[in-house]
Image (cartoon, rainbow, N blue to C red):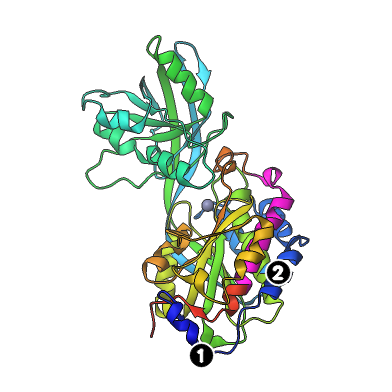
Amino acid sequence: MKIRAAFLGLCLAASAAWADPQRAAQLRDQALTDNTAWQVLESLTTEVGPRPAGSPAAARARDWGVAKLTALGFSNVHVEPFAKRAWLRDAEAGEIIAPFPRKLALLGLGNSVPTGPDGVTAQVVVFASLAELKAAPASCCAGKIVLVNQPMTRTQGIDGYFTAVAARSAAPVASAHGAVAYLVRSISTSTARAPHAGAMQPWKAGERAIPAAALGVPDADLIAHMAMRSPVTVHLALQSHVADTTAWTVSGEMPGSDPKAGTIVIGGHLDSWDPGTGAIDDASGIAITVAAAKLVGATPHRRTIRVVMWGSEETDGSGPAYLAAHRNELDSIFIAGESDLGADMVYGLQLPVGAWNAPDIAPLESVLAPLKVMARPMPPEEAGSDVEEIQGAGVPVFALSQDASHYFDYHHSQDDTLAIIDPERLRQNVAAWAATLSILADTNADFRKVKK
Ligand SMILES: [Zn+2]
């Protein structure tokens, strides 16, 4: 075919079918009045609630996922178990002792060690940034509690988070400076007092493990201001335990007409942090991909669309488990993507290199334009942490960029609940996914490098 020469790293399949922009536009418009995503999101957050991997709630989430996919007409609904060493929160408390008593709003960090029954009481040394802690003399903090009070920058994409989140894993730096505990200002763009949970990297052999927790933003600021005037003493009592458990990834499919054309793998993660009900992180990703797949699945389409509810994203595990379980079928995964940045509006689509030049993908730019979704020319560097491993093994990925400028006001906090979901923005998000999926399910372009 004459267009072949125009492609950059792309090849055309032999099939005569072509992606249909009119069908994609119809699905886009249908999604703008469809409430499936809202119903799925409401159901998961209300019926299961918080669901950390390894907790009893995770088993209820597994059963919910199987029942929901089945009820919505998905085929091949099944569960993929994998071993999970889970970190689970127990009783936690913290307070300022001096210069005056005040209870602290805090949450222990995933992979932290407990303080022991008597807790830790020590003076706090405050650093305005992680860089300042790293540059401090090794003797700075012996016997002290280190607080890194670095504010997070609000950005439309995820770069503000990627920059700020390093401080959440800096307990080993504090430990190397002699600290007895580590506190981090919540990785948050809000000034609300609710602390934001999250995991730190597991302790490595040779590191001296110390307890670590995130403080609500105003509490971190208060300690910083106090410390400019006089010594601040804090008491921390953080309990947690680890357990060898099982985690589960749940998936179902909307079968395509051509089994040889490959499978599209999309989804979100079923596990959540414990303070809220995991509405934006990540019931919304599950709801968006389930709703979009159901819409496209109800029309004729060539490739099978598989929706995956990954079972352990927050404390790691489901991405590597998915690669291990699907290593033998990587060449049949046509493309993969994950929705894991909330329920706000999509503003861009990133496809593999050269894809926008494919004759039956190029019209997607016009289909997405009324949604204010840009065709972004650069391919995605990443498309969600649960598809990172299969991406590393050669599976092509796509990414719908979504507005995260308010996401980190609530992420991993007690305010991540259904109350912060805007149904209209959610529908716009599903519309962008549905139109994109429709084109990817039928296109003659092929981005795969892993071939049999
Ligand atoms: Zn997430």
Dot 1 crowding, Cα within 10 Å, few <14, some 14–19, many 20+ = few
Q: CA distance from mark 2 to mark 1?
A: 25 Å
Give whichever of 69, 371 is nearer the camera: 371
Residue 13 image point, x, y percent: 50, 86
Looking at the magenta stretch, what is its main secondary structure? Answer: helix
- The residue tagged 1 is 14
Q: Secondary structure at mark 2?
A: helix
Residue 134 image point, x, y percent: 27, 32
Residue numbers of the magenta segment: 417-438
Residue at x-position 75% and y-position 65%? 29
Residue at x-position 65% and y-position 60%? 369
Residue 389 image point, x, y percent: 40, 64
Q: Which numbered circle lies on residue 96? A: none
Q: Please tell me whether residue 170 belongs to the stretch shown in magenta.
A: no
- Label 2 close to label 1 by CB (< 8 Å): no
Q: Is residue 195 above or below residue 219?
A: below
Residue type marked 2: Ala
Give whichever of 374, 412 is nearer the camera: 374
Q: Is residue 112 above or below residue 232?
A: below
Q: Quadrant of residue 133?
A: top left
